[in-house]
Image (cartoon, helix red, strand yellow):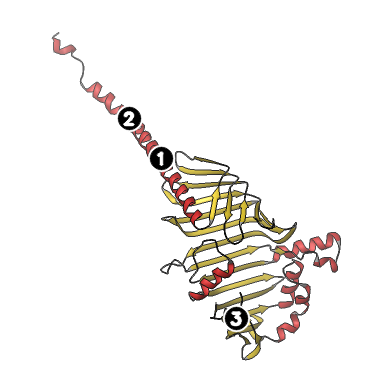
Amino acid sequence: MSVSDVRPDPVAPRRRWLIALPFAAIVLLGIGWSLAWNWGAGRAAAEIDAWIAREATEGRTWNCASREFGGYPFRFELICDAPTVTFSGPTDWNARMTRAHAVAQVWNPRHIIAEFEGPSVLTEAGTGREITANWSLLQVSGVGREGRAERVSIAANDYTLAEGGTTVFSARRLELHVRHHPGEALGTLDIALGFTGASGMALSTPQARTSGVAAAQAAALAAKSINGEVEATVTQVPPFRSMPAAQRMALWQQAGGRVKLELARITGGGGALSASGDLGLDAQRRPDGKLDLAVVKAQPLFEAMATAGLMPDFLANLAPAMMMAGLPTTVDGQKASSFPFAFRDGRVMLGVLPLGKIGPLY
């Protein structure tokens, strides 16, 4: 047997190398992904710091008792314990919550989803006045570009708003969506608001008609049936920096801002109230434009709203008389009363009927 007959097969090492190649690629990919994630996490943290700095220049100072960044390998997560924000202005306000948890996917860092733990307490620094909001679930979703929000959505379950121990508004479900109107200037916003199972601060009212458990059950039943939605476009919205409400309204009026109300609708007790129109303010800060209302089954609607604490009793009692002033029409095939209001030069008109005058709003 010759020497060449016992020489090792050169194919075997090559096969081992081919087998090891996928594992080496996975290791290199993991190292590369880790480096990329850490780079992205550092950039995201820097962007957050830059955003906080920009917010401070607009009169909103954000802070966390502690801040933790994580989410490796596929997400960026920010956990903020005891978040606070201070609104600077003629009257300083401070808002505080329990915890915030924000998440963004690595492949779409512009879309951030956050959950907040309640309650949230808003305190006026000068007077100590407190407004408390609470919920079982609060989620905020936002899409931004270059430090500006393009789209923001807020959704809350079992939402309550209280002041001085009195609940002024509650809803089983509350949603708010705001976006920059496509193709329009940054100051043009589309706004959509919706709520279900709403109730208000006058829940003691039904006790005059019933008492004890029956009153609570009546209020709860009415609250389950009061739903609402609003869709509108607002033009010439001033920058979102801290300023008095009167100053914000003045800037909006001077820029020629308008509220284009596509739809506002409240339903309850088998009835419905809907509205649409186009409103702004004239040079004397008075309402200018039109507002068209339509009411279906006013009596049961107003009674349901009164029982839920969203309307005083006396307005529910006046429903039949109020409907006599409306014009007959139909809404979704049902008989209704319409109220075409017009606001011009400080005068209020119902159709061609003058109702009176209205002064400046601020």
Which residue is most to the top?
1
Residue 162 found in image quarter: bottom right
Find numbered disc 3 in the image and state the secondary structure of the residue it sits on.
strand
- Cα separation between marks 3 and 1: 54 Å
The vertical placement of 154 against 355, above or below, is above
Q: Which amino acid lies under the numbered mark 1 shown in the image of this protein?
A: Trp
Residue 296 found in image quarter: bottom right
Residue 20 found in image quarter: top left
Q: Which residue is drawn at 54% across and 55% down?
A: 60
Residue 209 visible here: no
Residue beneath label 1, please?
37
- Cα separation between marks 3 and 2: 70 Å
Reading the chain from its start, which is encountered first: label 2 or label 1?
2
Whether the residues at callouts 2 and 1 have beta carbons within 8 Å, the answer is no
Whether the residues at callouts 3 and 1 have beta carbons within 8 Å, the answer is no
Relative image position of residue 122 (x, y in whole percent)? 64, 55
46 or 307, nearer to the observer: 46
Q: Which residue is drawn at 52% across and 72% down?
A: 252
The vertical placement of 339 against 31, above or below, is below
Residue beneath label 2, please?
24
The vertical placement of 1 against 134, above or below, is above
Q: Which residue is drawn at 47% across and 44% down?
A: 76
Residue beneath label 3, please?
292
Q: Which amino acid lies under the numbered mark 2 shown in the image of this protein?
A: Ala
Using a 10 Å C-alpha cutoff, classify the residue at mark 3 as few (fewer than 14 neighbours), some (14 to 19) or many (20 or more).
some
Q: In this view, does 253 lie to the left or right of 358?
A: left
Residue 24 visible here: yes
Reading the chain from its start, which is encountered first: label 3 or label 2?
2
Which residue is most to the bottom?
352
